[in-house]
Amino acid sequence: MYILLLNYRAWQDTVLCLGALERLEYANRRVLVLDNASDNDSVAQIRAAFPATELVQLGRNLGFAGGNNVGIRQALDEGAEYIWLLNPDTLPEARALSAMVELARQDAQIGAVGSVLYEMENPLQVQAWGGGEVVLHWGLIRLLTHAQQAARLNYISGASLLLRRAALERAGLLDEGFFMYGEDADMGLRLLKTGFKLAVASQSRVLHRGGTSWHGSSLNADEQFAAYNTRLFRKHAPWPWLAVAGYGGFWLAEYSLRRRWDKIKALGRGIARGWRMPI
């Protein structure tokens, strides 16, 4: 079992997460920290706090997909049956991993398992019940928050994503064309297309802060989000132009009601860029 933590500048979160991982009930685990070319003292801080933890320094920022793929390849090369992608801004509870593995072992067709994510500042508030839904016809992406919505689950959130070796071998690794958004939704859709199931372990509780992966302005984040979601719909939707139009129309209405003309411009730039991206 490999646990991958992809750090980018956020060594404080990573150190707290590593501390939580030491309390996991699942003993057969190997933790690998991948530093995505942080331009601060992340590597030194993490090594000082956890000198025995394996840490790989990437030569450049490869994004979420590219950075994690380095660890996934290593894990597969060394025979790992399961690989847990975990965001550093999370605090998994003691049974978080064992509950996911137990569920995966019940059915060989389960390709990915997620946790129930809770708000870091309000641990009783569900942030996402494993992941979310992608409505490809109309360009909608939304997180699910209740077990009753299980039939609509199309992807497992990358904040806590347990992947089976056989699923990766059949569906492929993360698509590195998604730099920091959309890669988990893409993986979920590809797993479903190749015949695997997605599942959520209700006893796997993970606190998640969220919003810490982007270290620029909110407008830049809006543009990135629009670009990679546009690429997602172009790749998977039966009628990409309709899905992108629906996605853009929804956010255009949302930003217009809030009179956020700057966000509308960022949305337009993102959609235009995403439409030109290779798929």
Image (cartoon, helix red, strand yellow):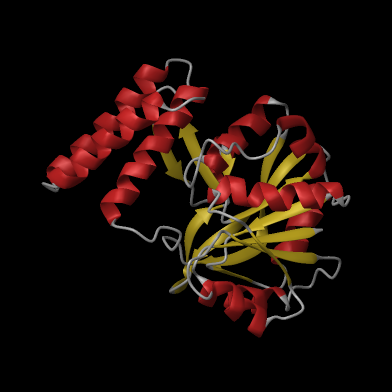
Q: What is the quadrant of the N terminus in the image?
A: bottom right
Query: In the figure, residue 193 lies in which quadrant?
Result: top right
Q: Compared to 115, does 150 lie above or below?
A: above
The furthest residue to the left: 259
Relative horizontal placement of residue 44, taking residue 220 as reference (left or right): right
Relative horizontal placement of residue 159, taking residue 222 as reference (left or right): right
Residue 219 percent location from the top left of the image: 26, 50
Relative horizontal placement of residue 87, taking residue 140 as reference (left or right): right
The furthest residue to the top: 239
- Residue in view at x 81 percent, y 68 percent: 26
Residue 122 percent location from the top left of the image: 44, 72
Number of dots carrying numbers: 0
Relative horizontal placement of residue 138, taking residue 185 as reference (left or right): left
- Residue in view at x 87 percent, y 52 percent: 78
Q: Nearer the viewer, residue 101 or 87?
A: 87
Residue 253 percent location from the top left of the image: 19, 36
Q: Compared to 244, does 176 lie above or below?
A: below
